Structure formats: C-alpha cells, structure tokens
Amino acid sequence: MKKLLTAILLTAGVTAAQAQSSVSVYGSLDVGYIGSNTTLVATPGGAPSNTVVNQFGTAAEYSNRMGFKGNEDLGGGTSAFFTLEFQPYPEDQNLSGSSNSGLLNRQSFVGLKKDGIGALSLGRQYTPIWRAYCQNSPTQCNNTVGDAIYLNAAAGGAGTSTSATYSGTESGLGFTNRATNALYFASDKYNGVDVTAMYQLNSNNKTQTDPATGGETNQSGGGFGANYEFGKFSAHGAYQQFTQFTTGTAMSWSDMINTVIVSGKDTQSYLGADYDFGVLKAYVSYINRNITSTYNSSQFIKRNAEQVGVRGFFTPRIEGWASVGTGSFTGIGAASSVNFNSYQLGSNYWLSKRTNLYAIFGSTETSGNQQTTAGAGSSKNMYAMGVVHKF
C-alpha cells in the first residue's frame, strides 16, 4: 500500500509538471496563381519597359510559415515562453541554401511574462509599427500590390522596388517589420491601453578612428508604440528608428526614386484608427519614413502615405476588403519627387476556420517630372487567386 501511494503521488507530480509546460506546432501554406503587369521608368526621362508575369506562385495573401511555440508556468503569475518561426517556399526544390534563402528566420525569441505587468522577450521579433498596423489593417498586410502603408518588398512598388534594409532588419517600403537582436516589452492591457517598447543592438560593436567613414560600425535601433481600445473604436501609434554607421551599405528606392543613401538613420512613424460598424470595419492610417545620411544631412529619402479602407463579412463565409491610398517619395533635390496612388480589392471564401480561397487585385501608379526623376510614370497591377490552409 505504501509503495502504491508513493507511485500515485509521483505520477500526479509528473502530470502537474506536464500541465504547466506546453509546446505547440503551427503554420500556414498559401499557393495559387499570381499575375502582374509592370511598367517601369528606371532612369530619368528614359523609355519605359514592360514586364508581364503569369505563374503558379505563393504567399500572395498570407506569408508561408512553420513555427513552434512553448509556454511554461513558473508559478506566482510568472511564465516563460519561446517562439521559433520559419518561412518555407513551396515553389522551391531546396529547403536551405537556395536563391530564396531557404527557410527564412521569421521569428526566434525567448522571454518571461508576469501577469498584470507584461512580457519581456529577446531575439528576432516584429517591430512596434508592424504590431500597431498589421493587426489592424484592411489588407492584413498581405503580399499583393496596393497597400500604401505596408507595401511589402515581395510585392514591389510601381515597378520592382526594393526597400532600404539594414543588417539585422527586414523591411517593406513602408516600414521595417522585423528586427534581429531585439529586446521587446509588451505590457498587459489596462483600462483599454497597452504599450510596447523595443531596443535593438547589433552583435558587432566596434569604434572606428576615422569619423569621415562613419564612426561606429555598430547598427542599432529602437522604438515604442501605444494602443487604445474603447468599445468599437481603437487607436494605434508607433515610432521607431534604425541607424547604421557605415559607408559600406547603400540604401535606395531604386526605381521609385533615383536616390541612394550610404550610412543612414532611418526614422519611421505611424498613426492609425479603426471603428467597427458591425458588418464593416473602417480604417484610417498614416505612415512617414525618413532616411538621412549620418554624415551629410542634405542626403535624404522621404516617403509618406495616407490610406483608408474597410473590411468585413457579407455572409458567414464570404469576407471582403477594399483600400485606397496616396503618398509621395522625395529625395535629394526638390526635383527628385514621385507621387503615387494605390488601391486594393480582395475577398476570401472560408471553407472552414482554417482553410480559405482568395482573390485579390491591387494597383500602384506614380506621377512626377518624368524628365528629372526615375520612377515617375511607372505602374504595377497585380492579381492573385489561391488557397490558404493554416494548422
């Protein structure tokens, strides 16, 4: 009897320990048809080139991912957690070492959480602006052209623009969405308010003796954000800045505006609000991005955009959204400017809570002085149909 009682107690202890710790696997795959028609004016006053794409592609609506999440109850309202999330490429025969960088490291961080205060984590994570916008946007930050705020580099701009990307970060044209070596704090919600803060420090920190070549080679960054909810209304704001003191890396929006910055300070700010009317949820957003040379303030690139949109369910299975935005790029010299207009229309048909069919169309067109500015007169239309399954 004594041995039996001891065995029961030990079994109960093991069961309790297992209940306090959990690991889950999650992910998604998005595949389908993607087409686009791009008109690009790559040089000031140059002749436009046209590129038409028709392909079976991936991730037009939802970025592919495969991840692991874990949580352990440490007692007293304290818990430990981690996330490892990677991006596979269904259209690529290789899992690593491919031209698509194989399994992209989307997120990898570990942290501690205290109930009533918040969570502190360290690793590769989303930035404050991403968390403020992409969880409250009409397009939900899909990868199709037409979102004037997010404008994922994978979708391209009016042409095939790629954005300024610093070592340890990943950017769309609108803002930086992920940062490596980032210390992040996210508070619990109190009276409808929660705040976030981030500090990034690159693992390489060396001081150079010649200030003309940039001073420190260390790249760092940080930011903060705040969210407020009151009934059906919510407001969101965030600010972040990344600096790289080196002349070895060039930053540019090459086909949107013919300007290149070396050794740059990248400042980004976002404001947005939304209101749930029931059938539809309405959104309004503003983004500003300014990249300035750390050793010559007259060298700069600026981008700003405003956008409004709606999203909602028309039937229990059919969801739709629409957005329209406008903005401008400005570079060194008053003549180096490009205005743009963007819009996107999309719909989901939900086969289940985890599986949906989608159809999306988006467009961006630019205007400006075509004799002096690259990118002026460019345009890109993109259309996609596919299926997403989440697990």
Image (cartoon, rainbow, N blue to C red):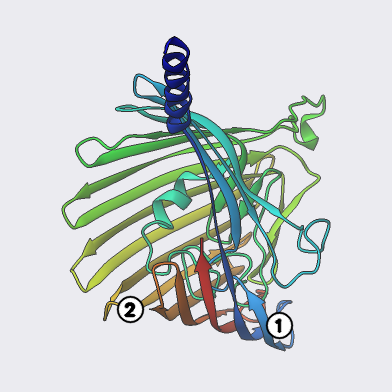
Q: Position of residue 126 (x, y in %)?
A: 52, 46
Where 342 falls versus 82 (above or below)?
below
| Residue linked to disc 1 | 45
Residue drawn at (51%, 60%), measured in percent from left and top? Answer: 391
For the residues marked 1 and 2, what is the alpha-carbon distance in whole angstroms? 49 Å
The disc labelled 2 sits on which kind of residue?
Answer: Arg
Q: Position of residue 152 (x, y in %)?
A: 57, 65
What kind of element bears circle 2?
loop
Q: Position of residue 198 (x, y in %)?
A: 50, 35
Determine whether, in the image, residue 361 is placed left or right of residue 66: left
Residue 331's quadrant in the figure?
bottom right
Where 318 falls versus 197 (above or below)?
below
Determine if residue 368 is in view. Answer: yes
Residue drawn at (58%, 60%), measured in percent from left and top? Answer: 172
Determine whether, in the image, residue 212 is placed left or right of residue 18: right
Task: Indicate which label's residue lies in the foreground, 1 or 2.
Answer: 2
What kind of element bears circle 1?
loop
Residue 324's quadrant in the figure?
bottom left
Determine whether, in the image, residue 237 is placed left or right of residue 329: left
Give the quarter of the figure containing the N terminus: top left
| Residue linked to disc 2 | 317
Residue drawn at (83%, 56%), measured in percent from left and top? Answer: 97
The disc labelled 1 sits on which kind of residue?
Answer: Gly
Q: Position of residue 381 (x, y in %)?
A: 56, 85
Single out the residue that lies furthest toward the left. 231
